[in-house]
Image (cartoon, rainbow, N blue to C red):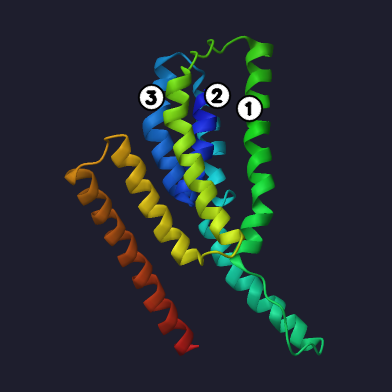
Amino acid sequence: MLFCCNCWSVNGCSTGIVGASVVTLGLLSLPIMIKNNYPASLSCGVICASGTLGQIIPPSLVLILLADVLSSAFQQAQLNMGIFSPETVTIADLFAGAIIPGIILPILYIIYLKSVSIEKQTLESENIIKKSEFLTSFVPPILLILVVLGSIITGLATPSEAAALGVLGALIITAIQKKINYKIIKDCSDESIKADKCYFHDTYWSNIFLIGI
């Protein structure tokens, strides 16, 4: 269960949205935890809590949307105050501000799980993860996240350029681990096209709505 919490803290960084994290986490982790006799209530709680990290840990889609709203509001407020060269709030600013809360929350989750296991003694002992499994499972995604976020925060790349860098890094990692094939690429491309269609559909009708107003 602790592994699940840690793993999906990393997953929150890669998805950036709550729905994707919770659905994926529920499908993959819940049957395994139930099979190993973990309490259903605690298992579902871990999934819900860990899944919501997707909207906190950068690159969160919520932070990207908030950056646009806050930037406009902050600039307008400065103009109203007579400041005619207003500063702005960037996506990098919000990403930098969300890093510490994104680290603290998983730590608090882990402390809570350990306290529950000690108090009630209902949780089975966690299987010891081999060092090699830890390195291959956690280190590559963490390094990729650090590279992508680091390039945004330091100003070396725009969010769009960093996203392209993240895709390239993910392809390299999966190729090194020999987990990539034509079917995976095709499925990822299909899902990306579906997500893009939803995005452009929402953007189109939002603009129509604004024009009508």
Q: Quick one: 62 or 107, which is closer to the camera?
A: 107
Residue drawn at x 33%, y 60% as measured from the top left: 195
Which residue is pictured at 50% across the width and 64% down the height? Answer: 159
**Residue tagged by mark 1?**
110
The label shown at residue 31 is: 3
Q: Is residue 97 left or right of residue 37?
A: right
Direction from residue 124 to residue 161 in the image, left or right: left
| Percent position of residue 105, x then y | 65, 39
- Can residue 59 be seen here? no
User: Of marks 1 and 2, which one's residue comes earlier in the chain?
Assistant: 2
| Displayed quadrant of residue 207 | bottom left
> Who is closer to the viewer here, 105 or 23?
105
Horizontal and vertical percent position of residue 85: 73, 87
Residue 87 falls in image quadrant = bottom right
Labels 1 and 2 touching (C-beta < 8 A): yes
Which numbered marker is on residue 2? 2
Residue 94 in the image: state x and y as whole percent: 64, 60
Q: Residue furthest right?
A: 81
The answer to whether residue 32 is seen in the rendering is yes
- Marked residue nearer the N-terminal end (2 or 3): 2
How crowded pointer 3 is (Cα within 10 Å; few <14, some 14-19, many 20+) is rated as few
> Horizontally, is 156 left or right of 76 in the view?
left
Residue 81, compared with residue 116, is above or below; it is: below
Residue type beneath disc 3:
Pro
